Image (cartoon, rainbow, N blue to C red):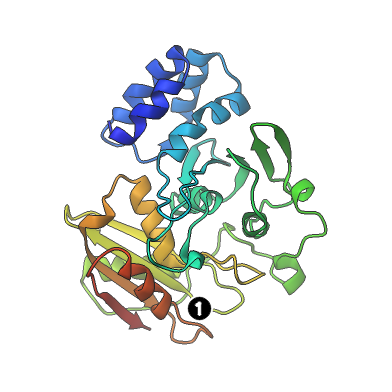
Amino acid sequence: MHPRFIKPLDTLPIPLSTALQPILASAGFCGQFTPAHVTTLKNASALDDRALRLALLPVAAAYSIAPISQFFVGAIACGNSGAWYLGANMEFAGQGLFHSVHAEQSAISHAWLSGETGIAEITVNYTPCGHCRQFMNELNTARTLHISLPNDSNTLSGFLPHSFGPADLGITDALMSPHSHHALQLDSDDPLWLAALAAAQQSYAPYSQGYAGVALQFANGHIVCGRYAENAAFNPSLPPMQMACAHGVLRGEDLASLRRAVLLESRNGSISQRDAAQSTLKALGSVVLEYRAV
C-alpha cells in the first residue's frame, strides 16, 4: 500500500478502514472503486452512498500535490456505470498557477479516461470554485449533475445559476458524450506515439478543433495518456499534459521517473498545446517534449 494512504486510513472508522486496506493495497488499485468495491465498503461501514463518499474524501485528497498553496483538495466522481473515481488538485512548482489541475477536473478526467460516458455526482471536500463549476457545466450530464459537500448538497444549477455552456454555442455533444474518433492519422510503430494518437482521436475540442493527446512513459515502462478537454468559457479548458500528469499520479506513477513525453495534435486546429506542454514539463525535470502535428 502506498504510504500516502496511511494517515487518512487512521482517521476513518475502524470497520471502514479495515475493509478499505486490502483494496488500497491491491496491485491493480489506481484510484478507482468498482461497484463491487463500493458494495463491500458500504456493507462494512453501514454507510449510504453519499456518507461513504464523504468519508472517503481524505483518501482522495491524499493524492493532492500542492507545493504552492498547501491546500489539499479531494474529489470523487460517480460514473454512470456505478464506479467511483478519485481526483485531487495538482500544482506545478515554479510554473504559473494556470497550469494547476483542480480536484474536480482530476476526478472527471479520471472517469473519462476510464471509459465513462457520464457523471452522476461529484463529491468534494471544499465548495467548488467558479472555475470548477464552469468546467463541470461542460459535461453532458450538467443539467442533472449533483454536487455533495460535507455541509451541503445541491445540483450544479444550484451552484451555477444562469449558466453559460456548450448549448449556448450550438454544441449538442458535450464533454463525455460518446462520439466517433477524430480523423487523425500517423504512420508510426512507436507505442508512445500510437498512445498519443489514440488520446488525440478521443479528445474534446468543439470550439477550436485543436484535438490533442499526450502520452507519458515512465522508467518502469508504463504509459499514461491525457486528452484535451475544451470548455465553452475557454479558460477552464484542461490541457492534455496536465490531464496526463494528474492521471499518472492516480495510477501510482512517480512523476520524477518520467522518461519521455510526446504531444500529438491536429495541424488544422486554431490553437496549439505545444508551448503550454513544454512549460509544464519544466516543472518535472529535464525531459524534452517530442511533438508532431498531423
Question: Of 127 and 159, which appears nearest the observer?
Answer: 127
Which residue matches tag 1? 210
Residue 92 position by quadrant = bottom left
Q: Position of residue 224 (x, y in %)?
A: 32, 57
Q: Is residue 153 above or below residue 47?
A: below
Q: Is residue 162 above or below residue 251?
A: below
Identify the residue at horizontal 53%, vertical 26% (top origin): 55
Identify the residue at horizontal 17%, vertical 56% (top origin): 219
Identify the residue at horizontal 55%, vertical 63% (top origin): 179
Q: Position of residue 236 (x, y in %)?
A: 59, 65
Q: Residues within 10 Å of mark 1 (few under 14, many from 20)?
A: many
Left or right: 3, with 39 as reference point: left
Looking at this view, name the residue that lies furthest to the right: 162
Q: Is residue 105 above or below residue 13?
A: below
Q: Quadrant of the N terminus?
A: top left
- Amino acid of disc 1: Gly
Q: In the structure shown, which secondary structural element does the residue marked by tag 1 occupy?
A: loop
Left or right: 262, with 37 as reference point: left
Question: Of 210 and 277, which appears nearest the observer?
Answer: 277
